[in-house]
Image (spheres, helix red, strand yellow):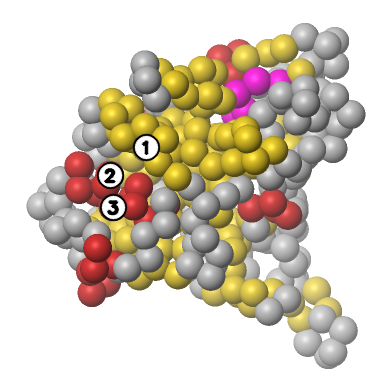
Amino acid sequence: MYAKYVYSAGSTAANILADLVAILTGETNVANLSASCDKPNTSILSTIAAGWVLHDATAGTNAMCIKAPLADDANAFKYVVLDLNTAGFVLQKVYEAWDETTNTGTNLCNNSATTSGAQQFSTSVTGTVHIFATARFVLMFSNVSATWGSSTNSGASGCVERTRVCPWDTPIAGWPPFAYTNLGDMATNGGGTYPPRILTKAGTTLLTTQTLMTAHAGTQGAVHTMMSTFASIDQKVPDGSGGSVIPFFPIAWMNTTNMPAPYGEISSTCGIFALPQNIATNLDVIVKNGLDFICIQAAGSTKMFAVRKG
């Protein structure tokens, strides 16, 4: 699912929250959204279903919890609390578990509750939230007064599910194959991705509060991309028919200190790829293998990701 959600000046946080939750839980008719929605300029494309369901409508003040099943275990879920209680910010708090009776979560993903990586909104001026989602992920990318993305790293953010490639990482063992991520931080540092918990090579468990995934040069490991590698050369590749195409770089996760091997990637599960620098413009549409991808900028206007549209 891809939605361009536009809200009007004078909107309320409650209405914006209700609209975001409605879109992510399957609403496809713009006419059914709240009075805050700028309906003529809002669109929803649902070639692929959004894939999330409402889990807790009372997760907090101006907060609701949604969930989506894991790819390899339909009875296990990833949980995201959409929280608009902090003025000007859409927090996507990612949890390993959430109790809808006590309205509390377990193993909050590091940085997902901070405003620095959150998307922005306004109750005084019009704004836009680009929303990408399937049952594997949810990603938001905001625009308020010509400011794109999160307040610190200017990137999209959300919850993404990875593949499993390590022997210890099985559904039966119960390891959560998802994380909170901010693409702006990923573009700047190669980091910015925080799972609820992870196994170390010594066989112990680290919780997200111990900063599992930090910058590329940090001691705790990183998300690796090839985003910044080829900035000074022609970055297109031959298409085999006399033309050229933009390469899509898959995004793998590894933790160089605690788990020094790739333990999954998000490109095949979520349809999110890194692009070379200086090769596309924000919101460009690129067709790859017959599918549309939208380019979204991160950490400035030259670093780009491509996300499956619809």
Residue 83 visible in this rendered orientation of the protein: no
- Please give the residue where the numbered disc 1 appears in the rendered image: 82
Q: Amino acid at mark 3?
A: Asp
- The span shown in magenta is 194-198
**Residue 230 position by quadrant:** bottom right
Mark 3 or mark 1, which has the lower sequence index?
Answer: 3
**Seen in the image, is 59 located left or right of residue 69?**
left
| Dot 2 alpha-carbon crowd within 10 angstroms: few under 14, some 14 to 19, many 20 or more | some
Mark 1 or mark 2, which has the lower sequence index?
Answer: 2
**Seen in the image, is 283 located left or right of residue 174?**
left
The answer to if 196 sits in the magenta stretch is yes
Q: CA distance from mark 3 to mark 2?
A: 5 Å
Q: Nearer the viewer, residue 300 or 162?
A: 162
- Please give the residue where the numbered disc 3 appears in the rendered image: 19
Marks 1 & 2, CB-CB < 8 Å contact: yes
- Please give the residue where the numbered disc 2 appears in the rendered image: 17
The answer to if 272 sits in the magenta stretch is no
Residue 172 visible in this rendered orientation of the protein: yes
**Residue 127 position by quadrant:** bottom left
**Residue 56 position by quadrant:** top left
Q: Is residue 96 above or below residue 28?
A: above
Q: Is residue 61 above or below residue 233?
A: above
Q: Amino acid at mark 2?
A: Leu
Q: CA distance from mark 1 to mark 2?
A: 7 Å
